[in-house]
Image (spheres, rainbow, N blue to C red):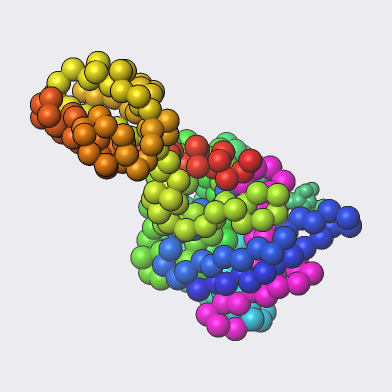
Amino acid sequence: MLVLDSITRRFGERLALDDVSFTVPDGRMVGFVGANGAGKTTTMRIALGVLAADSGTVTFRGTTPDLATRRRFGYMPEERGLYPKGRILEQLVFLARLHGVDRAVATRRGQELLERLGLGERSRDKLESLSLGNQQRVQVAASLIHDPELLVLDEPFSGLDPLAVDSMAELLRERTAAGVGVLFSSHQLDLVDRLCDDLVVLHGGRVVAAGEPEELRRERAGSRYELVADTDLGWLEEVPGVRVVERHARGAVLDLSGGDPAGGDLAGGAAGLDQQVLAEAVRRGPVRSFAPQLPSLSELFQEVSR
Ligand SMILES: Nc1ncnc2c1ncn2[C@@H]1O[C@H](COP(=O)(O)OP(=O)(O)OP(=O)(O)O)[C@@H](O)[C@H]1O
């Protein structure tokens, strides 16, 4: 696994990274999110060894990565690395050769990757002759060409159509299944939600949330509940402490933050308001589900990025 421990980096007076620590375990997809200027690219550059930290350490599988180890990393930089006027497959092969891959192997792998990304027919064309989204696919292929042990991808999905996102995600999933850790940044939160195993949220150069998205959501579930029941739920409007946020065909979303968590007499017991609402709903008829409503990734992001 890749471990970043207490990384700090300044640019002049500006503290771009402040005590950043997180891990990219082998075989996991780690989504890296944060507003513009939060420090994602700076962190990735430091992780890859292309930029130095002022303090803190980066280790990969227990040791500080030397040049030989770093050659086994795959990196898609923010500024992208390929030449617009270069031929596609030639450039992939050239990059693979820089990483020590044999020409024949590199050519086969390059062609395979391009075919997987729907660009098999274009391998001899110049990069600039492709649409921007297709150029983006080739940039990702370039980071995969030498079969790396770790992938660090700066916005690999930007500009891709939904089908291209799926084929790219499948390609990356194959890498994680083979034990490769993947760190990828993105501003597309729904996509990150769908793809990542772990999430790291950066805000103003600090890690403000890290962990499995489901876990992070549960921690911030707050006081919203969804009740799905067969009966009419109009009675909820009258319950002190209950605010009906939304009604839908089968139930309602409730905010119970106005209630006394330790008691109340709706159902005559000392249970919290959630249990009282549930008991009352059951008394009135069949309840299909009643559970805390977890915030979306976008809500979570907004909350931790304040
Ligand atoms: N070479 C540099 N010189 C001076 N300041 C820099 C340099 N690189 C980054 N910064 C500053 O460091 C902060 C973090 O920038 P960084 O590019 O890492 O953010 P980011 O999260 O990748 O943003 P975006 O989502 O816009 O790509 C910003 O305030 C940026 O202006």
Residue 155 vertical position relative to residue 67 in the rendered view, above or below = above
Residue 278 vertical position relative to residue 80 in the rendered view, above or below = above
What is the span of residues highlighted in magenta in the rendered image?
34-63
Q: Is residue 55 left or right of residue 22?
A: right
Regarding residue 213, the answer to whether it shows in the image is no
Q: Could you say where residue 239 lies in the image, as x and y percent from the top left?
A: 31, 23
Q: Hey, which quadrant is residue 74 in on the image?
A: bottom right
Q: Quadrant of the C terminus?
A: top right
Front one among 243 and 177 = 243
Q: Could you say where residue 87 lies in the image, as x and y percent from the top left?
A: 62, 52
Count of labels in the image: 0
Q: Residue at x 65, y 49 (%)?
A: 203
Q: Could you say where residue 30 lies in the image, as x and y percent from the top left?
A: 49, 58
Front one among 142 and 170 = 170
Front one among 119 and 151 = 151
Regarding residue 59, the answer to whether it shows in the image is yes
Q: Residue at x 25, y 35 (%)?
A: 276
Q: Residue at x 21, y 34 (%)?
A: 268
Residue at the right extreme of this rendering: 12
Q: Could you say where residue 85 lies in the image, as x and y percent from the top left?
A: 69, 48
